[in-house]
Amino acid sequence: MSDTNKKVVLAYSGGLDTSVMIAWLKQKYGLETVAVLVDVGRVSGLEELRAKALDIGAVEALVVDAKEEFARDFILPALAANALYEQKYPLVSSLSRPLISKVLVEAAREHGAVAIAHGCTAKGNDQVRFDLGIRALAPELEIMAPAREWGMTREQAIDYAAENGIPVPLKKESPYSIDENMWGRAVECGPLEDPWSEPPEDAYEHTVSPAKAPDEAAYIEVAFEAGVPVSFDGVAMDLTALLAGIDELAGAHGFGRIDMIENRLVGIKSREVYEAPAALALIRAHRELEDLTLPRELAHFKQGLEQKFAELAYYGSWYDPLMDALRAFIAETQKRVTGTVRLKLYKGGCTVVGRKSPNSLYETGLATYGAADSFSHDAARGFCELYGLPLEVWARKGGFRE
């Protein structure tokens, strides 16, 4: 591709790689870049980043506020699915990629671009997520991934930026790669690549060390309506505000750190560090409310689908027909998931200590081992009718008392 009049839409973050790409695409291919920064939360200095893209050489720079759509159409389905890849990772980056792909496709069509470029490397998962998302929505567009092509190390990219007057918020002695949104924060590279070494404290921004967390526990209450969190400590708020509130409080108590060996989509193992206080707390609360409100067979069956949901999202298959079917089924399960869950935050822990629901399937009279440890006659009759058991058989065995 070498036509100097052609445009490429770039998924722009303002970080090292995508900043370098604006200049590199011009130098290498003579392409005019339309930089698109998609705000999915926790992005500060948006106008400064937009101005930086123009200063580097972008012919146009767009900032797209997608926070509400991200919360509604991506986070909520993942929460309903209690989605944790390999039972640990709440899909922080995975969930934003299909939405960013959608915005990029819309921008490419609006600006007549012939290609979409992203900043993913050949070793990461995001290259597949972007490629699949863009291919699913716009198979006619070419996809460019300069970081798979240019052969620069991270240090060389920093040097390239310095040589070309491109400002980047990095130092060679702390070369973390960071991606974050309202669902959490992902940190890679540098000292984190040694799986034996404890992550340095400077890798974390939204959680304190549990050793330095307050000595007194904090209790919070989260209310759900049909699986959707609607209030925090009795105050009704939208999901964006609710996430921010829980994130701040849970992080201040040292909860939300993840340090894991992850099986990447591309077939390698990697050491990953995440901060996701609100995501992990909400998944824990939501799952507990489901335990209270979903019948056994539905709850057990749903667990297998939750794992498949997490895998498909992680693999970049958000627009796959199977994902559509999973989301529809999981949405159906949420109709009775209404109630309130109380969480205890203490020294890096988050424990469910209370739950209640108008749709609760928990019956104290049936569950108790105390003085009321028996079925009433009416309860026994209902039980026998449900399972086709003759009532007189239950009575002969002393299963209930008048």
Image (cartoon, rainbow, N blue to C red):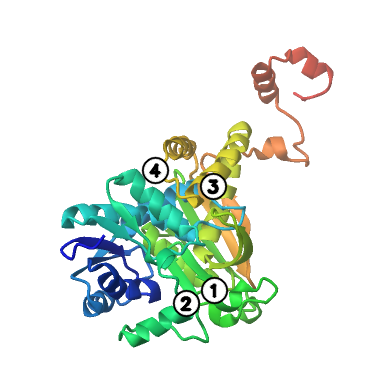
Q: According to the image, label 2 marks what residue?
A: 154
Residue 192 pos. (x, y %): 60, 74
Tell me which amino acid carries mark 2: Arg
Q: Secondary structure at mark 1?
A: loop
Q: Are marks 2 and 3 in contact (CB under 8 Å)?
A: no
Q: According to the image, label 1 marks what residue?
A: 189
Mark 2 or mark 1: which comes first in sequence?
2
Mark 3 or mark 1: which comes first in sequence?
1
Q: In the rendering, which numbered label is found on residue 319?
A: 4
Tell me which amino acid carries mark 3: Glu
Q: Secondary structure at mark 4?
A: loop
Quadrant in which the N terminus is drawn: bottom left
Q: Are marks 2 and 1 in contact (CB under 8 Å)?
A: yes
Task: Please give the name of the residue rendered at 60% of the width and 35% of the height, measured from the top-left corner.
Answer: 301
Q: Secondary structure at mark 3?
A: helix
Q: According to the image, label 3 marks what residue?
A: 311
Mark 3 or mark 4: which comes first in sequence?
3
